[in-house]
Amino acid sequence: MSSPFLPWLIISLLLGFFYLSERPILVVGLFTINILGFCCAYLQWGFPELVPLQQLSKVGWISILSATIYMSWMAIYYASMITMRSDLERETERHRETAIRLRTAKDTADVANRAKSIFLAKMSHELRTPLNAVIGFSEILLEGVELDGKNEHKNLTSNVSMQPETPAVTCDRRA
């Protein structure tokens, strides 16, 4: 059995595995359908051993058409590969720019956090120093009032008290 279509079937199988390597079941399925179609055509009409020259021209045109279709598919395949590659490059560049922006934002946040910590440490010191003086002075006044035995200034000096859990000073406004 000789036919110019048989080499195209074998080439189509090889090309199918090359281009569709991630879907081998599809390739084998399509190849099986092609072989079954070839066998059905052979059983239905048969293929002569020698093909007259006039009929070979039809086979030549079919072969040229098949080669043209093959070349078109290859061109489409490579165009899609180049498009996918450029899409991938654009996506990579977008991710790179996002990473740079995130790194810059993180650095800015770190600088702001350090500045906040320094500010709070300085402000804590600036508040504690005068408050300690107020607390100390109020304790001196309370001791002095208790020693004198006079109650006229006791209400005023007892308004300032220190909480046992925190070093904050509270003023009792109700007195």
Image (cartoon, rainbow, N blue to C red):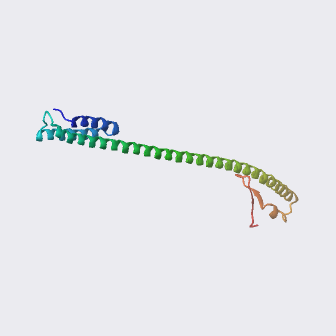
- Residue 12 lies in what quarter of the image? top left
Picture mark count = 0
Quadrant housing the C terminus:
bottom right
108 displayed left or right of 91: right
2 displayed left or right of 132: left
Give the residue drawn at x 12%, y 35%: 48
In the picture as drawn, the residue positioned furthest to the right comes out as 148
- Residue 159: % across, % down: 78, 62
The answer to whether residue 29 shows anywhere in this view is no
67 or 119, nearer to the observer: 67
- Residue 71: % across, % down: 33, 41
The answer to whether residue 37 shows anywhere in this view is yes
123 or 136, nearer to the observer: 123
52 displayed left or right of 155: left
- Residue 174 lies in what quarter of the image? bottom right
Q: Does residue 156 lie above or below 164 as drawn? A: below
Q: Does residue 20 lie above or below 123 as drawn? A: above
Give the residue drawn at x 16%, y 38%: 39
In the picture as drawn, the residue positioned furthest to the bottom comes out as 174
- Residue 171: % across, % down: 75, 61
11 or 175, nearer to the observer: 11
82 displayed left or right of 29: right
122 or 101, nearer to the observer: 101
- Residue 25: % across, % down: 28, 39
Quadrant housing the N terminus:
top left
Q: Does residue 49 lie above or below 106 as drawn? A: above
